[in-house]
Amino acid sequence: MKRPARISPAPPAFPEPSSVDAVFRGVVVKGARIGRQLGYPTANMAVPEHPPVPSGVYAVWFTDASGRRFAGVASLGVRPTVEADGKMLLETHLFDFCGDLYGQVCEVTFCHLIRPELKFGSLAELRAQIERDAVMAKSVLSGTASMMPFDLSL
Ligand SMILES: Cc1cc2nc3c(=O)[nH]c(=O)nc-3n(C[C@H](O)[C@H](O)[C@H](O)COP(=O)(O)O)c2cc1C
């Protein structure tokens, strides 16, 4: 008699970026500057104990103090890959931006949750994932989110 086919367990459920709508305003502060080494410099902001959204990686719109708006990808979390006991931080990588935002009061509008924060085995793995996050963020912000499930094969 033929055995019934085995059904493998479903992959972790991060099927598509989910829509969020929250705004955070804060001062841009200096970070440890590892982001530059990764090729993804970030505008960093301290966040309150109860941030406006849960920790995770988001597609965002970022507005600087003079009202210029940039698309970006942001990470809200404690950075388990690089810090053992990190403080909650909001780090935004802006697309098509080059310059200095330190000390400016800026605004981050959270649009889509892309994935939860994860601990990676190396900076190279983190970098590769941020690259995928950036592609996804550009896609959702331009209104063309892929219907493909998020690839969590790290
Ligand atoms: C889009 C994006 C996603 C990130 N995802 C994670 C993550 O899943 N896990 C993690 O430990 N750090 C994550 N980070 C934070 C990086 O560890 C951090 O940006 C890097 O260490 C550089 O920080 P620094 O420039 O403030 O030193 C992410 C950062 C960005 C911009």
Image (cartoon, rainbow, N blue to C red):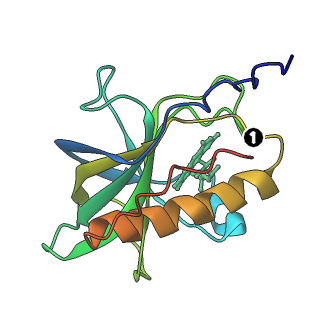
Amino acid on which the number 1 mark rests in the picture: Phe
Q: Give the residue at the far right of this rendering.
A: 1
Q: Give the residue at the far left of this rendering.
A: 67
Disc 1 C-beta below 8 A from ligand 1: yes
Residue situated in front as seen by the camera: 96 or 136: 136
Q: Can you see residue 101?
A: no
Residue situated in front as seen by the camera: 16 or 86: 16
Q: Quadrant of the N terminus?
A: top right
User: Residue shown at 83%/19% (left/top)?
Assistant: 3
Question: Residue 91 at x, y = what percent?
Answer: 45, 51
Q: Can you see residue 131?
A: yes
Residue situated in front as seen by the camera: 128 or 10: 10
Q: Image check: 47 left or right of 80? A: left
User: Residue shown at 65%/44% (left/top)?
Assistant: 152
**Residue position marked by numbered label 1 in the rendering:** 120
Question: Residue 93 at x, y = what percent?
Answer: 46, 64
Q: Quadrant of residue 127?
A: bottom right
Question: Residue 131 at x, y = what percent?
Answer: 61, 66
User: Residue shown at 40%/80% (left/top)?
Assistant: 97
Question: Residue 49 at x, y = what percent?
Answer: 33, 20
Q: Image check: 22 left or right of 141? A: left
Residue 154, compared with residue 10, is above or below; it is below
Residue 119, compared with residue 65, is above or below; it is above
